[in-house]
Amino acid sequence: MTGLGEPRRIVARRTVLAGGVGALLAGCGPRDAAVGRLTIAAGEAGGFYLEFAQLLAAQLDFAGVAREIVVRPTTGSKENLRLLLNRETDLALSLADTVTPGPEITALGRVYENYLQCVVRADSPYKTLRELAGTRISAGAAGSGAAVTADRLLTTAGVTCTVDHLLLEQATKSLAERKITAMFWSGGVPTSTLDKLSRSVPLRLIPLDGWLGALRRTYGPVYQDVRVPAGVYRGTTPVSVVGIPNLLLCRPDLPAAAARRIVETLVRRASNLIPPSAVGAQFLNLQSLVVSAPISLHPGAVEQYRRMYG
């Protein structure tokens, strides 16, 4: 474990599904579970990964995909990938730029867009990435995808900082107390922990789009230009940052029946898989779900996408 707490268990409710709640599944009806237990490696408390994983677990439970579903808090993408490769989890969320293609990992879909956010206090003098040179920052928790992307961005921009790798709650506290000048975070927008901070400490987001072309030339087309709307955090103005697709991953030996049922849930229950606070771009439609590059789709996922859409 990572010290982030015990896995959160969502116990299957077979007797409930046998009653009226089953009608919420668009006519699917109760079915035998595809597997006995599923574990989802998620992310930090207060972040989009964990919120999404909890919603997904609830919908998989309603759909009867497994008899027990466990959501495991982690530090993010790198730890999730390690757990997946070590067979300590069945499903894992990861940024597309963090995962390395190989025969041991497949995808169930491209589920949403992560926003790499560089956050400073609004009363600080820092307005560009290069102005952070020589300061102390947090570049995402150790084991997170944000740490990978932030390191690439700083290297590309030629910006040298004293870098800490703090958990989200630690980073926001350090920013509020002026122990760091900036923090990188990769997640949906708004991120609830940053939203809470902005209500007591006005924040500013640093624009990152000026480095997008160089990132794409060096690391490939996975990076996208995404815009954070005005007021996502109290008082913030519109700003362009770096978007990274987020993938729901599994191993190739996940039973095909489970893969099919998970994909069916992603498609049919999409509206129930978006945290209420999120305003950022959400995929969860056929056109985007199937674009899982650089990772190939699980054969069961391919079968289900074709079965549903031809």
Image: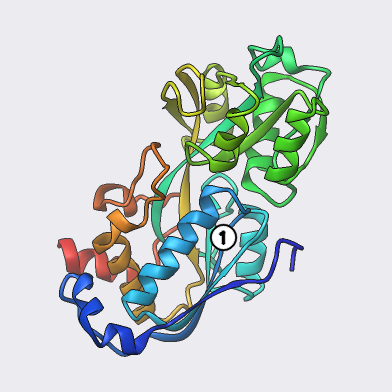
Q: Position of residue 107 (x, y in %)?
A: 44, 61
Q: Is residue 258 above or below residue 169?
A: below
Residue at image coords 50%, 55%: 51
Q: Is residue 69 above or below residue 220?
A: below
Q: Quadrant of residue 299?
A: bottom left
Residue type at tag 1 = Ala
Q: Position of residue 290 (x, y in %)?
A: 32, 54
Q: Position of residue 303 (x, y in %)?
A: 27, 70
Look at the image and tell me whether residue 86 can be seen: yes
Residue at image coords 38%, 84%: 13
- State the quadrant of the N terminus: bottom right
- State the quadrant of the C terminus: bottom left
Q: How is the image coloured?
A: rainbow
Look at the image and tell me whether residue 299 can be seen: no
Number of residues whose C-alpha sits closer than 10 Å to that of mark 1, classed few (under 14), some (14–19) or many (20 or more): many
Residue at image coords 71%, 13%: 124
Horizontal side of 309 relative to 269 (left or right) equals left
Horizontal side of 108 relative to 1 (left or right) equals left
Q: Is residue 86 above or below residue 79?
A: below
Q: Position of residue 104 (x, y in %)?
A: 56, 68
Residue that carries the numbered disc 1 in the rendered image: 42
